[in-house]
Amino acid sequence: MVFSSIFRKDNIFCLGNITDRFAVCMGIFMKNIDSLKNYNEFKNVYDNGRSYANKYLVMYAIRNEENRRRLGISVSKKVGNSVVRHRVTRLIRESFRLNMNLLSSGLSIVVVGRAAAKGRNYKEIESAFMHLCKLHGIVNNNN
């Protein structure tokens, strides 16, 4: 049996054609990331949270009462056009998603992409993200 593509159906990655009813599903579920949605949530983190910065990113973090990790991402037009801004946003979100289990729960985090993040690869953004998490002291030591 030859699989022509990998596709996502109901948050399960499957091998085969989208029209194939008997596709082999691998059972890998996508993790949903809780995000900060509106102005007031961002403003609360900006006003009451601590901030640290490095060459590529600025991170604001504050404890929340919800016992879950929430992420907000801001990348301004100074970084580049929409394609560049969305790439930086995706890299930051992926860094958060893959390292989420290393972070303390009950956090609201806002990450601001700087102009220097333009054109950087995933490893550089992930390294910058984890550096800021360590500065904030939100990395669990028991992992």
Image: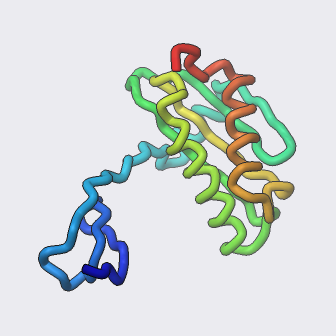
Residue 41: x and y in percent read: 52, 39
45 sits left or right of 136 in the view: left
Decide: is 140 above or below 58: above
Residue situated furthest left in the rendering: 21
Q: Residue at x 65, y 52 (%)?
A: 74
Decide: is 70 above or below 90: above
30 sits left or right of 44 in the view: left
Quarter of the picture holding the N terminus: bottom left
50 sits left or right of 23 in the view: right
Q: Residue at x 66, y 43 (%)?
A: 111
Q: Residue at x 60, y 23 (%)?
A: 139
**Looking at the image, what colour scheme do you see?**
rainbow
| Quarter-of-image position of residue 117 | bottom right
Q: Residue at x 59, y 59 (%)?
A: 90
Q: Nearer the viewer, residue 116 or 121?
A: 121
Residue 142 visible to an observer of this rendering: yes
User: What is the total number of numbered labels drawn onto the structure image?
Assistant: 0
| Quarter-of-image position of residue 103 | top right
38 sits left or right of 20 in the view: right
Decide: is 110 above or below 103: below
Q: Nearer the viewer, residue 114 or 125?
A: 125
Residue 92: x and y in percent read: 63, 50
Residue 83: x and y in percent read: 67, 74
Residue situated furthest front in the rendering: 1
Decide: is 86 above or below 93: below
Q: Nearer the viewer, residue 60 or 141?
A: 141
Residue 40 visible to an observer of this rendering: no
Residue 128: x and y in percent read: 75, 41
